[in-house]
């Protein structure tokens, strides 16, 4: 009887709760399977251009999951599930290996890889990266690893030790989604990072919000004062691009220039000289 009323309470959430739980278990099971087979995960690369010259200088690796029945799934959907299911280390290793293999074949430029807070907290992470660099022959100076501002702020000692070990190897560290985490202008002089990626939410405001323009300008100035490079993510308009170039932001990334594309497309861009279309004046 108690059981029956328990069930009754459960169904007051509606059938939906049930469906969500079942779907979630299915996704987890499929993630497991996808990690042992090959061919379902693909790494795409989004170009980053030097603002002043328009040179292609780096790409960011972004993973996609081509699910056999659900189609192409976004990392914002499956990365959190992989993290909770204990699968992010395996997935992260796959992305890192693919990205290093691809970049080792390119004559120029660096590759940036997103790293989950769970990977940063793994004591073996730095030596795993070192082994991957050796196996693929990629120069450590051509690898950049991204940590979100939030993960960096509550960085554990293990996370910090990983960052130090990697920077000693020559790997660059970028603070991702900067500006969303109420940090850290103060902590930045510890210089445990090389690079700041200004979050898209601020870039969206350029040309619309004086406040966002002031914030972006302040981030760029502060970063430069500390010797850090800046990248704007999510650049979508010519106006944003011009503003960012004007205030001295170093690198631009966004749909205005390119969406994330296949490794073959990057090969072609590089063969064509690695220049973005010149901004119209
Ligand atoms: P992120 O690292 O901040 O990556 C930037 C995201 O913004 C990418 O979404 C990119 O496609 C998107 N983007 C770039 N330019 C524009 C633009 O102009 N307009 C709009 N609307 N979007 C733009 P994506 O590929 O869906 O990735 C989402 C997030 O998933 C990433 O955000 C990152 O946090 C995470 N992620 C992706 N790949 C990996 C991975 O291999 N490992 C881990 N741990 N996380 C990953
Ligand atoms: Mg990123
Ligand atoms: Mg980002
Ligand atoms: Mg982001």
Image: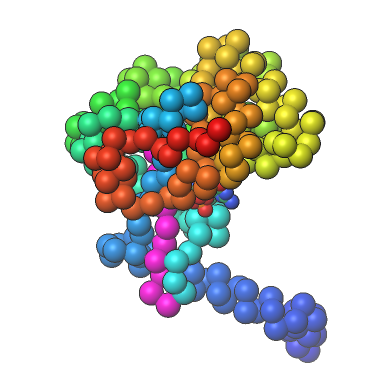
On the picture, is 143 further left or further right than 29?
left
The image quarter in which residue 22 lies:
bottom right
On the picture, is 11 further left or further right than 167?
right
Q: Tell me residue 193's x, y (percent).
A: 51, 21
| Image quarter (top left, top right, bottom left or bottom right) of the N terminus | bottom right
Give the main secondary structure, helix, strand or loop, of the magenta stretch: strand
Write the residue at 53% across / 45% down: 256
Q: Tell me residue 234's x, y (percent).
A: 57, 43
Q: Is residue 198 above or below residue 89?
A: above
Q: Tell me residue 85's x, y (percent).
A: 49, 58
Confirm whether residue 18 shows in the render. yes
Q: Is residue 68 magenta?
A: yes
What colour scheme governs how the chains and residues are painted in the rendered image of this protein? rainbow
Confirm whether residue 156 shows in the render. no
State the extent of the magenta-drawn residues as a range: 59-69
Q: Tell me residue 118's x, y (percent).
A: 50, 42
On the picture, is 137 further left or further right than 125?
left
Q: Is residue 269 magenta?
A: no
Write the residue at 43% across / 39% down: 277
Q: Looking at this view, is 164 or 73 the one in front?
A: 73
Q: Is residue 82 above or below residue 140?
A: below
């Amino acid at each position: 009887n108690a059981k029956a009323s328990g069930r009754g309470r459960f169904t007051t959430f509606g059938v939906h709760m049930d469906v969500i739980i079942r779907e979630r278990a299915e996704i987890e099971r499929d993630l497991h399977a996808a990690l042992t087979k090959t061919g379902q995960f693909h790494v795409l690369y989004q170009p980053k251009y030097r603002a002043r010259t328009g040179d292609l200088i780096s790409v960011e690796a972004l993973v996609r999951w081509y699910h056999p029945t659900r189609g192409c799934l976004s990392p914002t959907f499956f990365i959190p599930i992989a993290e909770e299911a204990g699968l992010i280390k395996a997935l992260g290793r796959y992305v890192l290996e693919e990205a290093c293999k691809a970049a080792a074949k390119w004559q120029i430029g660096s590759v940036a890889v997103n790293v989950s807070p769970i990977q940063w907290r793994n004591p073996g992470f730095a030596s795993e990266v070192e082994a991957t660099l050796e196996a693929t022959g990629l120069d450590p100076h051509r690898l950049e690893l991204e940590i979100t501002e939030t993960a960096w702020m509550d960085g554990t000692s293990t996370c910090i030790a990983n960052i130090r070990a990697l920077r000693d190897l020559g790997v660059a560290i970028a603070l991702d989604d900067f500006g969303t985490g109420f940090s850290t202008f103060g902590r930045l002089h510890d210089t445990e990072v090389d690079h700041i990626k200004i979050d898209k939410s601020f870039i969206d405001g350029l040309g619309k919000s004086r406040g966002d323009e002031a914030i972006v300008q302040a981030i760029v100035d502060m970063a430069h004062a500390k010797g850090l490079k800046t990248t704007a993510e999510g650049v979508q308009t010519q106006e944003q691009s011009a503003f960012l170039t004007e205030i001295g932001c170093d690198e631009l990334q966004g749909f205005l220039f390119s969406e994330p594309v296949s490794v073959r497309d990057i090969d072609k861009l590089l063969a064509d000289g690695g220049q973005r279309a010149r901004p119209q004046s």
